[in-house]
Image (cartoon, grey):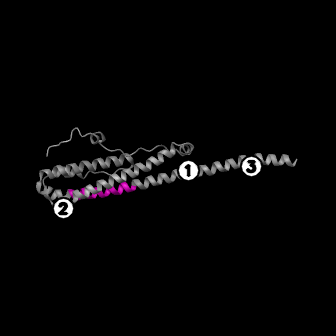
Amino acid sequence: MEKFISLVTSFLVIPFLFLFCLIIWFIRASNKLNRYKIIIKESEKNLDIALAKRYDTICQMIKVAKSFAKYEKSTFTDLVKLRQESGIRGFENVIKNQDQAIEKIHVLAEAYPELKSSEEFLRLEDEIDDENEQLAAAKRIVNNNISIFNQEIVSFPTSQVAKLKGMVEMDFLREENLDQKKSIDDFDYNV
């Protein structure tokens, strides 16, 4: 009888231990995915900071340009429409809008040579170059964190936890006009 009780107890303890280990694993995997989501949000906030800094520099460039080109009101009202959005697609739209604003400012500078040679304008152009490097670094960090998260949620058995939590793969930040940047066929070699 004692052997029978020992055998029954073993059959009850083994499934209980297995279930206990499964629950512990599920909690650990769930917490790991939650940490990755927080890391991605943090890197997106760093991207927000880079975009805000770039926005401020663009606004300064607009102020400098306004002092040289007082009659270009339509250009300036278009530039002020740099909107803030959220999410990966929102970041891409903000970056695209800021890039367009910078292009418009440079076109305006071509029309006003004294603006183009202004010391303050040249300093702001250098700041934009630095901010573009910071922005590129922030984009790489966001994409790297998204990559780590995506790898986790498609890897078995963590993929099952992600599925239960409704987590799906996230989109990466994309680079605009990538095909043009890969080819030098249309490059102007004239000096």
The part of the image, by quadrant, that contains residue 55 is: bottom left
Instruction: Using the numbered discs, state the Cα–Cα distance from disc 1 to disc 2 in whole angstroms.
Output: 52 Å
Tell me where residue 138 appears, x and y as whole percent. 36, 53
Q: Residues within 10 Å of mark 3 (few under 14, many from 20)?
A: few
Instruction: Using the numbered discs, state the Cα–Cα distance from disc 3 to disc 1 in whole angstroms.
Output: 25 Å
Tell me where residue 189 appears, x and y as whole percent. 17, 43
Instruction: Using the numbered discs, state the Cα–Cα distance from disc 2 to disc 3 in whole angstroms.
Output: 76 Å
Residue behind mark 3: 13
Please tell me whether mark 3 or mark 1 is closer to you in this view: 3
Considering the numbered disc 1 on the image, is that residue within a helix, a strand or a loop? Answer: helix
Callout 2 touching callout 3 (CB < 8 Å): no
- Classify residue 165 as left or right of residue 179: right
Q: Camera-side residue: 89 or 187? A: 187
Residue at far right of view: 1
60 up-or-down from 185: above or below: below
Residue behind mark 1: 30
**For the magenta stretch, what is the residue range?**
45-61
The kind of residue tagged 2 is Glu
Residue at point 34%, 47% (across, down): 92
The kind of residue tagged 1 is Ser
- Classify residue 70 as left or right of residue 80: left
The part of the image, by quadrant, that contains residue 61 is: bottom left
88 drawn magenta: no
- Classify residue 156 as left or right of residue 99: right
Tell me where residue 178 appears, x and y as whole percent. 30, 41
Residue 120's tag is 2
Callout 3 touching callout 1 (CB < 8 Å): no
Tell me where residue 165 appears, x and y as whole percent. 54, 46
